[in-house]
Image: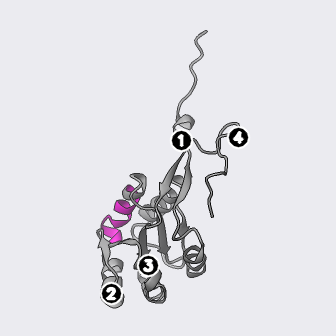
């Protein structure tokens, strides 16, 4: 499927001001809270063949568990509560992460809830695909776009932070 014919600049104001190409080999962040780690590990095990064709990144403990139990090569950041969520968010903002599988625990408050919210916000801000549960992750990995290159739209939000100065004052 080629999405290069889709227009994003014809809207007024434009929906997106540019696009960023994701190659067919994606950089995928894998993150899970404690009570969701086994679910993510099981999902990675089931999808090992597909995931092995991409570059995988994870927060400390989650990345280590996936590497040890499944044998996938995972580049690890710090543990989530020790800044790993922020490191992944920074990588997203530098266009180093293309998509994120984040199995977060909806029933337990986290000591770093602000970081979790910031990570999810950054994912939306930079328009990367984000799956927060197994069903969404299944849809994402089974999409024909998963192994193809894809141009994701980028919105220039800086316009929302600038104000026109009335020169008549």
Helix, strand or loop at label 1? It is loop
| Residue at (67, 47) in percent of width and height | 7
C-alpha separation, residue under disc 3 versus residue under disc 1: 31 Å
N-term mark: 4 or 2: 4
Residue at mark 3: 51
Whether the residues at callouts 3 and 2 have beta carbons within 8 Å, the answer is: no
Q: Residues within 10 Å of mark 4 (few under 14, many from 20)?
A: few
N-term mark: 3 or 1: 3
C-alpha separation, residue under disc 4 versus residue under disc 1: 14 Å
Q: Nearer the viewer, mark 4 or mark 1?
A: 4
Is residue 44 shown to the viewer in this render? no
Q: Residues within 10 Å of mark 1 (few under 14, many from 20)?
A: some
C-alpha separation, residue under disc 3 versus residue under disc 2: 11 Å
Residue 80 relative to residue 152: left or right: left
- The image position of residue 15, as x and y in percent, is 64, 45
Residue 166 relative to residue 21: left or right: right
Helix, strand or loop at label 2? It is loop
Magenta stretch, residue numbers = 79-90
The image quadrant where one finds the N terminus is bottom right
Residue at mark 2: 71
Q: Which dot marks residue 156?
A: 1
Q: Nearer the viewer, mark 3 or mark 1?
A: 3
N-term mark: 4 or 3: 4
N-term mark: 3 or 2: 3
Q: Nearer the viewer, residue 49 or 73?
A: 49
C-alpha separation, residue under disc 4 versus residue under disc 3: 36 Å
């Amino acid at each position: 499927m080629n999405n290069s014919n889709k227009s994003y600049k014809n809207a007024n104001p434009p929906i997106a001001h540019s696009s960023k190409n994701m190659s067919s080999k994606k950089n995928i962040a894998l993150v899970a809270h404690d009570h969701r780690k086994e679910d993510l590990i099981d999902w990675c095990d089931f999808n090992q063949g597909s995931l092995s064709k991409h570059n995988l990144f994870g927060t400390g403990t989650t990345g280590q568990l996936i590497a040890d139990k499944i044998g996938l090569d995972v580049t690890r950041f710090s543990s989530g509560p020790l800044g790993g969520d922020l490191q992944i968010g920074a990588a997203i903002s530098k266009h180093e992460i293309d998509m994120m599988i984040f199995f977060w625990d909806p029933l337990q408050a986290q000591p770093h809830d602000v970081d979790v919210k910031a990570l999810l916000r950054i994912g939306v801000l930079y328009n990367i695909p984000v799956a927060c549960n197994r069903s969404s992750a299944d849809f994402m990995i089974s999409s024909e776009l998963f192994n193809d290159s894809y141009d994701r739209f980028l919105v220039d939000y800086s316009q929302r932070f600038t104000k026109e100065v009335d020169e008549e004052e």
